[in-house]
Amino acid sequence: MPENKEDLHKTLLARNQEWSARMHRENPELFTELSKHQHPFFLWIGCADSRVPPNQITGTMPGDMFIHRNIANMVIHTDLNMLSVVDYGVNVLGIDHLIVCGHYGCGGVKAAMGPEFGGAASYWIREIRDIARMHKEELDAIVDEEKRFDRLVEINVAEQAYDLSRTAIVRDAWAKGRNLHVHGWVYGLKDGLIKDLGVTHTRYTEA
């Protein structure tokens, strides 16, 4: 990136031109096909963190993934933005694999482990604080703070995947016989690898 921050946006535009030219060379029909329709294979709910770009870390192409991102990859049942994405992805685009992917070192989860604070973000982080409270016994038993942090990241992903499986959208899809899968993953900033938590929901079960 250039040293002059005023020129940062110009760098993005130049790189876009380079990327477009490269894509045209490698797959001349790519943009023609993408302009006609979208048939993604995955719906991704991830963190807004700039270090976790979904397409890059999964090696997928434009058109492969329908993406929603927010702070700490949360699935909150009053979030109409998230619910609209899930509804469109499941009922219009016909996506069968829904992924909640968090990441180690998540600032939102870290904030939930610290003291209370003000501002709009505090309301969002409140959800993670409640999750930490629900799992207090397990978390308090982990002496190492970094490992406790990592574990809360994993627990948060598991809880969000569970909450996604409880949405009316997903439940209705299962009731109609859809072979929907809800996955819980965690990405490692230190090694670039995704860890499958083994959290997969394939049918509705009573709590």
Image (spheres, rainbow, N blue to C red):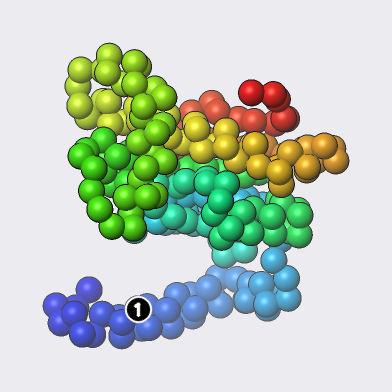
Percent position of residue 175, x then y: 82, 37
Query: Please, which residue is most extreme toward the right here?
Result: 176
Q: Is residue 192 left or right of residue 38?
A: left
Across and down, in percent, residue 133 comes to 36, 27
Other-residue count near label 1 (Cα within 10 Å), few / some / many at <14 / 14–19 / ≥20: few
Q: Does residue 118 sit above or below 200 in this rendering?
A: below
- Residue 33 figure quarter: bottom right
Image quadrant occupied by the C terminus: top right
Question: What residue is shown at x 57% (from left), y 33% (from top)?
Answer: 162
The answer to whether 57 appears left or right of 42 in the picture is: left
Report which residue position mark 1 lands on. Answer: 12
> Could you say which is closer to the camera, residue 148 or residue 200?
148
Relative to residue 178, is residue 84 drawn left or right? left
Q: In terms of depth relative to the viewer, which is nearer, 192 or 128?
A: 128
Classify 34 as above or below 182: below
The residue under the point 31% across, 31% down is 150
- Kind of residue at disc 1: Leu
Residue 93 image position (x, y, % from top left): 73, 58
Look at 50% across and 32% down and name the residue there. 159
Residue ID at (31%, 85%):
10
Q: Give the structural element (helix, strand or loop) at label 1.
A: helix
Please indicate, yes or no, whether residue 77 appears anywhere in the rendered image.
yes
Residue 39 image offset from top left, x and y in percent = 71, 61
